[in-house]
Amino acid sequence: MTSTEPVLQVEGLVKHFPIRSGIVFKRTVGQVKAVDGVDITLNRGETLGVVGESGCGKSTLAKLLVGLEKPTSGAIRVRGEDVTRLGRSGMRRLRRNVQMVFQDPYTSLNPRMTVGDIIGEPYRIHPDAVPKSGRRAAVRELIDMVGLNPDHISRYPHQFSGGQRQRIGIARALALKPEILICDEPVSALDVSIQGQVINLLEELQDELGLSYLFIAHDLSVVRHIADRVAVMYLGKVAESGEENQIYEHPMHPYTQALLSAVPVPDPTLRGQRDEIVLEGDVPSPANPPSGCRFRTRCFKARAEWAKTATDEQRKNTPLAEQAPDVCKQQIPVLEIREGGAHPSACHYAQERDVVHAH
Amino acid sequence: MSSDINERVVEGIDEERERPQRAAGLWRDAIRDLRKRPTVIISLLIILVVLAIGFFPSLFTDVDPKACDISRNKAPAEPGHPFGFSHEGCDYFAQTVYGAGPSVQLSLMVVTGTLIVGGLFGILAGFYGGWVDVLFSRAVDVFNSIPFLLGAILLLTMFRDIQMPFVGARLQAIIPAVITLIIFGWTSTMRLVRASVIEARNLDYVHAARSLGASNARLMFRHILPNAVAPVVSLIPLSIAGMISVEATLSFLGLGVRKPEITWGLMIDDATKWFVNGYPMLLIIPSAFLIATVLAFVLLGDAIRDALDPKLR
Amino acid sequence: MTVELDRQGSHNGYVEGLPGYRDDAPLLEVEDLQVEFHTRDGVARAVNGVDFSLRAGETLAVVGESGSGKSVTAQAIMGILEEPPARVAGGEIRFRGVDLLKLSAERRRRIRANHVAMVFQDALSALNPVWTVGFQLGELFRKHRGMSRKDARRRAVELLDMVRIPAAAQRVDEYPHQFSGGMRQRVMIAMALALDPEVLIADEPTTALDVTVQAQIMRLLSDIQAERHMGLILITHDLGVVADVADDITVMYAGRAVEQANVRDTFASPAHPYTKALLRSIPRLDVKGQRLEVIAGLPPVLTDIPPGCAFAPRCGYAQDVCRTERPPLSTVTAGRSAACHFASEVMTDDVN
Ligand SMILES: Nc1ncnc2c1ncn2[C@@H]1O[C@H](COP(=O)(O)OP(=O)(O)OP(=O)(O)O)[C@@H](O)[C@H]1O
Ligand SMILES: Nc1ncnc2c1ncn2[C@@H]1O[C@H](COP(=O)(O)OP(=O)(O)OP(=O)(O)O)[C@@H](O)[C@H]1O
Ligand code: SF4
Ligand code: SF4
Ligand SMILES: [Mg+2]
Ligand SMILES: [Mg+2]
């Protein structure tokens, strides 16, 4: 069902959180650059996987897309209309079309509301969506759709297992018949077999309703399974994006390669034999990202390129984080198709390296 | 979309026996639950009786509590005078009945007032944060830095000369105390509510409702408040008890309700000097009423808190 | 990676003065542990006879379906179950020979402060939203090490640094909700390591972390483990991590340990049908599969565990005997045990 008809386009999206200090009168002393210039496109009926380091801005991106945070700058177009310029009523309209599934099935459902109230809440907030008389039936239908028993409408969340709760969260997100579902790590808190159930359900719903998903996860195997295209984020920027196959089989960006190589393989006989790329150095602060390429303080590729020309003296005296060629330190690499690759990556020295099959 | 897993999951649940369908909702379920508990029924009965005594004392005794005969001071019980006589020779049963009024009315009014004021400020401060929070929190600090008694004395002497229109004499006697106690009492409720609201404000389910487009009022009253209710509800009975004793202190200082009005606080205060001198009943009787009242509120508060938590149901 | 931990005042040998202490006893032994919850629907037997032992320097992985009692077991070891509704109905938990279940609340608190620490599963609710991260970390040092406010804050920054929180000195004064999910989880790890424990129970410590940070954290834990000879109980559903770091594995189902063995053996030839199904449902990185395999059906309701094998309704190997007789956890081959009537057949059957 995948088409190239874009339903969601994000251009130059930026979100900076002020860092404040002081108790009564707060001064802004800096900015956490949580999302710093992100461009992505989501097509109708497609799943875009978003992966990346913890703290790189994935959840912030998701919150911006559903309107939980206001962007500092940039545009979010839903079906061509820039929602960042919308007023209150326009926002309400947007919210019906873009919904979110939260990470934690234990905290994302109000413990004091019944399942029926939780799934029916969207209708109370948007009374025009379904007439009052039809709401109960609509709720039951949703419960049925996500594979729960409609007779459980009067139960409370704690009476369900994690996977069942996640289904409740999905049913709530589907109530207003959105076209776009933002899933922020929807299966991270679930065990493997329940993870499978939820992912299978999401795939079925997509086939049936033509939904588009933005699927955030840090489990790269899960993302590979569900995504058509993948965007890899690092420190608030997209490092590489492409078709699922391109990213997993032909990764171009050193960070993607490190990420893929670090995925633990469920096979103890391979312990210690995997060709894991170990990232050295500290994760830089998003309040004060490195100049040029943001990955340069930890980049093995940059270090190798630098070492080619460095003198012995330099090798001894340059701190690890500074061992990078000048181009990496000075020029921000743009996300574009690079030589030797078929998909965009943001690296001056982009080069394919197979890491998934290397072991 | 009939996936076999889904079907199997549904079957798995079906195996548990299903109760018949019924309407559900937090408050409806809570009330249903409360009705089933014997402690709730008992404590409600006690509270109703105390309220009835407090507001309509003449239904319970024909004896005038102020008709005292000093010659019968501290005389033991006799027919028609089941509790004996006070140290001023007044009928102790009638005094106990009439003494309930000011104590009960005052504490109820104060607690309701502090809940409304403190609760509202707490929600606003916790929910909006920023300068709203700073404003209310500093106000709390200011009020807390004034010594209670000093402030109370100041305020109450100020009130002394003000005549309130449309208010009966009995209420006239307690309203200044009520206002004073609310002014000094809302801060603790406000802090408690604010803390719970801050805790709940960033929970995922609040974000979830917000992302659906819920209004601020809906977020506050539907999602955040029910989760802030528990600590507050459990505070109510204790503050009622506290207010009754504060009322006694104020009366003792000549600031609250004054003799010849009768309150449990005044009675207990008077009786303490006779306790070790051979007349323990004078203290025990009003204290027993006080304790029973407070206990009833404690039990009810506990039950309400539990009933509002579906996990405990 | 340099690991610098607070040595001073730790290992004051608190446990050594307690009844049952033996120098040569295993670090931690759990024997036939049973925990039940008294709910309005009846008694839920959340932990139903769990045994394992942990040696110093060893990593024991505990895996199992959601609700199988992993966290409850951990909480029972820590002595932080809410009683009631919970009740430890039987069994022993011996730390260096000392049965923790027989100790007073105060003694258990001191064991927690000095010897056994835990990383909680739910990082968001384990941190208090109204205090800064630094204050909560520093409190540990103030309370248990009597440090001054300033020193405690300095130690807090060091710990945040150790778990790779960028710009730790700047972020130490922020509140938990200003941290991302993964950062909160790392704060929890820092808190658990703060007082230099001998046993660390890590309940899903890396669920919110991306693989590179996960790898760093796991490396950090194993460095500390090697240096300090710390025993690690790793509760996780990430079988990749288990394969990577664990020595032994305990698989739990419906409150029981159903399989125990060396990690290599278990992955090579699982001896219990549940373990087998679990291993089959792992999504793979190197292939784009079709539907993911799932284990059909639901685990039993804990208030009403059927007689016989609890896995029988979902088990492909089940026979009549499974529905009437409860299989004991017994040795299959040297060093491995499983609670299945047909363990040896399951084991020799081809996995993939
Ligand atoms: N309300 C906030 N105030 C200040 N900083 C924030 C706020 N929310 C997020 N941040 C910061 O923004 C950055 C990105 O956070 P975000 O939650 O988007 O990360 P993430 O990619 O979802 O990480 P994870 O995988 O750990 O969930 C982090 O450094 C975080 O601390
Ligand atoms: N306070 C409680 N009251 C009643 N039952 C409880 C309580 N706490 C836990 N349980 C039950 O005990 C069982 C075991 O729970 P536990 O948290 O140990 O599961 P787990 O194996 O850690 O699962 P997960 O992988 O989801 O974390 C569950 O069925 C749960 O419902
Ligand atoms: S641009 Fe330079 S530093 Fe950045 S990823 Fe490429 S090689 Fe590494
Ligand atoms: S005992 Fe029977 S039902 Fe249980 S796991 Fe073994 S084969 Fe399956
Ligand atoms: Mg996140
Ligand atoms: Mg758990």
Image (cartoon, helix red, strand yellow):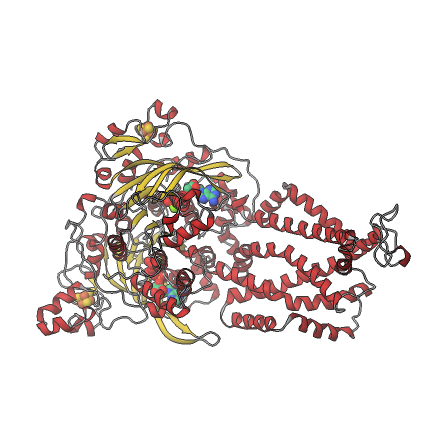
Residue C28, image quadrant: top left
- For this rendering, which residue is in front, B269 or B108? B269
Looking at the image, can residue B73 be seen? yes
Q: Position of residue A108 (x, y in %)?
A: 44, 53
Q: Position of residue B51 (x, y in %)?
A: 75, 53
- For this rendering, which residue is in front, B216 or A96? B216
Residue at 64% x, 63% y: name it: B114
Q: Quadrant of ligand 3?
A: bottom left
Looking at the image, can residue A79 be seen? no
Residue B11 lies left or right of residue C23; in this view the side is right
Residue at 42% x, 58% y: name it: C127
Q: Position of residue A301 (x, y in %)?
A: 15, 64
Q: Is residue C14 above or below residue B146?
A: above
Q: Is residue C102 above or below residue A129?
A: above
Q: Position of residue B243 (x, y in %)?
A: 68, 61
Q: Quadrant of the N terminus of chain B?
A: top left
Residue B114 lies left or right of residue A25; in this view the side is right
Q: Quadrant of the C terminus of chain B?
A: top right
Q: Is residue C101 above or below residue B233?
A: above
Residue at 63% x, 61% y: name it: B115
Residue B17 lies left or right of residue B33; in this view the side is left
Q: Is residue A258 above or below residue A166?
A: below
